[in-house]
Image (cartoon, grey):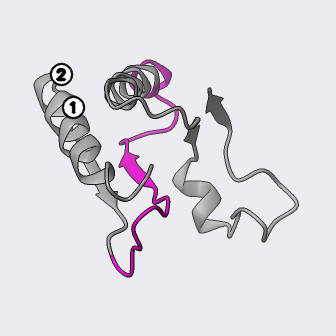
């Protein structure tokens, strides 16, 4: 997400998650961000095994993304991947198990 739009999309995602009773945790990188650069918005879920929950959160994020005309894909990465050091460019494995374009 472009740095200029990120705070607004983030706020909308948080509001929609809370309204849907799906709020858990989310964060946005905000240090050393230059205008025009892209930054990730990260939403956490309680369990990567709760596929219905994953799907509902994805739909909410997609809705917020679309309302700001952001066309970047959504990735789902379980915390287990982070714990095992599976990151983009660092591991032979893809750092996500779900991609929605």
Determine whether, in the image, residue 67 is placed left or right of residue 15.
Answer: right
- Residue 66 in magenta stretch: no
What's the mark number on residue 88?
A: none
Q: Are marks 1 and 2 in contact (CB under 8 Å)?
A: yes
Instruction: Report which quarter residue 89 is drawn in.
Output: bottom right
**Residue density around tag 2, few if under 14, some if 14–19, many if 20 or more, within 10 Å:** few
Is residue 71 positioned above or below 20 on the image? Answer: below
Q: Which residue is mark 2?
A: 20
Q: Which residue is mark 1?
A: 17
Q: CA distance from mark 1 to mark 2?
A: 5 Å
Is residue 101 positioned above or below 80 on the image? Answer: above
Instruction: Using the image as rendered, state which of residue 78 and residue 43 is in the foreground.
Output: 43
- Residue 43 in magenta stretch: yes
Q: Secondary structure at mark 2?
A: loop
Q: What residue span does the magenta drawing correspond to?
A: 31-54
Instruction: Using the image as rendered, state which of residue 97 and residue 32 is in the foreground.
Output: 32
Is residue 74 positioned above or below 33 on the image? Answer: above
The residue depicted at 34 percent of the width and 79 percent of the height is 31
| Total numbered circles | 2
Quadrant containing the C terminus in the rendered view? top right
View extreme (right): residue: 92
Magenta: main secondary structure equals loop
* Percent x, y of residue 80: 59, 56
């Amino acid at each position: 997400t472009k740095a200029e739009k990120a705070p607004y999309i983030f706020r909308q995602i948080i509001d929609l998650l809370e309204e849907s009773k799906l709020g858990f945790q989310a964060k946005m990188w905000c240090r050393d961000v230059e205008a025009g650069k892209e930054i990730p918005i990260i939403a956490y879920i309680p369990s990567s095994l709760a596929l219905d929950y994953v799907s509902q959160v994805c739909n909410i994020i997609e809705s917020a993304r679309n309302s700001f005309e952001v066309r970047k894909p959504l990735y789902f990465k379980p915390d287990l991947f982070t714990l095992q050091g599976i990151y983009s460019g660092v591991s032979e494995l893809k750092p996500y198990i779900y991609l929605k374009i």
